[in-house]
Amino acid sequence: MSLALKQVFNKDRTFRPKRKFEPGTQRFELHKKAQASLNAGLDLKLAVQLPHGEDLNDWVAVHVVDFFNRINLIYGTISDSCTDQTCPVMSGGPKYEYRWQDEHKYKRPTALSAPKYMSLLMDWIEVQINNENIFPTNVGTPFPKTFMQVAKKILSRLFRVFVHVYIHHFDRVSQMGAEAHVNTCYKHFYYFVTEFNLTDHKELEPLKEMTSRMCH
């Protein structure tokens, strides 16, 4: 990692405080296991596989939180070049436009600038992962039946951040020497969501060509 990149990532320019796993909990142990696999340089395709004897919901929850933290940080590093003026529409090139919809203010899909969309997205995800009824932290508390549905929605929306960053801001990523870091994070994300079928294939279309070169 270049010195400039280290300085950027050390600033921890995420929009929101990180959701952390409490030491001593089962999910903290799973988080450590996942990190150890990555740090050991294990093939990413193997690193995403469910460890023997572990619960799939727990494994997905750990990765959703981790990807949220990491993708939030990646967007934070290029956010100074993603403004209402440079990116008046949240898009991934001319063919793909993403509209925001939620249960509160935007009940119909609404066209927004990329930074506005990103801010609402990170807010929305933070609410989901800090909701004990969706992401229970106590061992023994069951996940709700809707958990996987919520996880899929979070991951699909996080994928759109990659789409926007790669298509509209990759020059900024390269300038900062962050290309290898972002590519590794993308590959890890892609292998994870495809391993467990967590994202609709049509969501993956905008980066299909790049993915076929990068993820064999």
Image (tube, grey):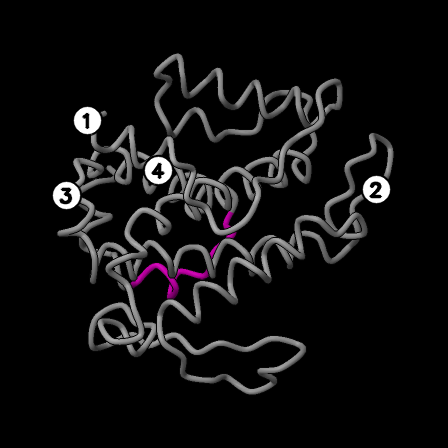
- Give the number of the mark in front: 2 or 4: 4
Image spot of residue 8 (x, y percent): 30, 37
Q: Nearer the viewer, mark 1 or mark 4?
A: 1
Q: Is residue 130 above or below residue 84?
A: above
Front position among marks 1 and 2: 1
Q: Disc 2 to disc 3, how far (Cα)?
A: 43 Å
Mark 1: amino acid: Ser
Q: Residue at x 58, y 82 (%)?
A: 106
Residue 54, position as x, y percentages in the image: 68, 26
Foreground of the two, 8 or 57: 8
Q: Which residue is mark 4?
A: 185
How far apart in space, not on screen, are marks 1 and 4 (Cα)? 16 Å
Q: Are marks 3 and 1 in contact (CB under 8 Å)?
A: no
Mark 1 or mark 2: whose residue is earlier in sequence: 1
Residue sitting nearer the eye, 16 or 68: 16
- For the point 35% across and 34% down, which residue is it? 9
Tell me the crowding category of disc 2: few under 14, some 14 to 19, or many 20 or more residues within 10 angstroms, Cα based.
Answer: some
Residue 102: give x, y in percent of width and height: 60, 75
- Circle 2 SS class: loop
Instruction: Please tell me how crowded label 4 is: few (under 14), some (14-19), or many (20+) other residues with Cα within 10 Å.
Output: some
Mark 4 vs mark 3, foreground winner is 3
Between the C-alphas of marks 2 and 4, the distance is 29 Å
Mark closest to the chain's N terminus, 4 or 3: 3
Occupied quadrant, residue 99:
bottom left
Q: Secondary structure at mark 1?
A: loop
Q: Which residue is mark 3?
A: 174
First-in-chain label (2 vs 4): 2
Q: Quadrant of residue 149?
A: bottom right
Residue at the image point whose x is 25% and y is 57% from the top = 207
Find residue 32 and report its image quarter.
top right
Report the magenta residues as a range: 197-205
**Amino acid identity at mark 4:** Cys
